[in-house]
Amino acid sequence: MNNKPNWKGRRNYNDFSSYFKSIFKQRIQKISINAGFTCPNRDGSKSTGGCAYCNNNTFSPFYCNPKKTIKQQIDEGIDFFAAKYKTQKYLAYFQAYSNTYAPLSVLKKLYSEALENPSVIGLVIATRPDCIDKQKLNYIEQLAKKYYVTIEYGIESSLNETLKKINRSHTFEDTIHAIKLSANRGIHIGAHLILGLEGENYLDFIEHAKQISKLPINTLKLHQLQIIKNTKLEKDYLKNPDNYNLFTADSYINLVIDFLEHLNPDIIVERFVSESPSDLLIAPKWNRVKNFEIVEKIDKKLKEKQTWQGRLYDGIYYT
């Protein structure tokens, strides 16, 4: 049995909030940006229609609009958050679609415009594993010497059969390659994973934890599968609801506990759940249970069971 690590926070998992506070010593707010990117599974270069579950309206605040310049989106975002918190710095979060899916000259222009604001101290760049290369990483590595920079890769599943089913149009081998290519550059590497995709079961979810634990990533975002309006998944779900074993809040918490036990304790967990707008969410509906409530229940249950992140981690890495 692995001994419980001495993390910065008091939780029984490696929590993002404690990590962030230890780095910045002040409040940091992400400002979402829609820079007008697309994805290779939308524009026809690999496929069309995008990911089966994707509707970007679920995480687009009012100021996040590709018709506005990067500067306008950041200024409006700062005005919005400054009304609540007077003193803080910001990370420009290139969130919508695949934010390295453009020529390097375009990326340089967009990222530089975001960093021109003196209140912006870094970037978070959400993208796909098949939308990165050495040339782009060399540039981002240079930015990371001066700013806090995270590349957040959408992994979603470690099973190629699932990735094909949800129209990701990349493989888990692509994920391994991209993350290894990004490592040891001073860039923070984040990953995103969905638990509950069609056809996957408990053993698959635990295997995801084991496979992700082998990767040189810094942070992980988890969330439960949600059926969102105006997606391919919505159409499939309404036709064949029995094909989907959607979690209740309690069953999801129990799964996360088991997932965490197998997860590399060095990986910082940034998020456990997604909370989509009620007017877009079809299922599952958890009676308005908030993200922070799920977090507290997970940590409470970890302590009640006297277990923790990494208790069953085997210590194996990809080479």
Image (cartoon, rainbow, N blue to C red):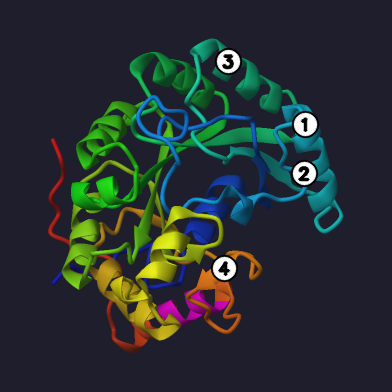
Q: Quadrant of residue 252?
A: bottom left
Instruction: Give the CA separation, mark 1 to mark 2.
Output: 8 Å
Q: Which residues are magenta?
A: 293-298
Q: Earlier in the sequence, mark 2 or mark 4?
A: 2
The disc label shown at residue 106, or none? 3
Tell me the chief SS of the magenta region: helix
The disc label shown at residue 68, or none? 1
Q: Check disc 1 and give the amino acid type.
A: Lys
Q: Quadrant of residue 276?
A: bottom right
Is label 1 in contact with label 2 (beta carbons under 8 Å)? yes
Residue 80 vertical placement versus 132 (above, below): below
Task: Let me know if residue 313 appears in the view.
Answer: yes
**Nearest the eye: 148 or 134:** 134
Q: Check disc 4 and give the amino acid type.
A: Leu
Whole-percent x, y for residue 226 in the image: 46, 66
The residue where tag 2 is placed is 63
**Nearest the eye: 263 or 226:** 226
Is label 4 in contact with label 3 (beta carbons under 8 Å)? no
Residue found at the very far front of the displayed protein: 239
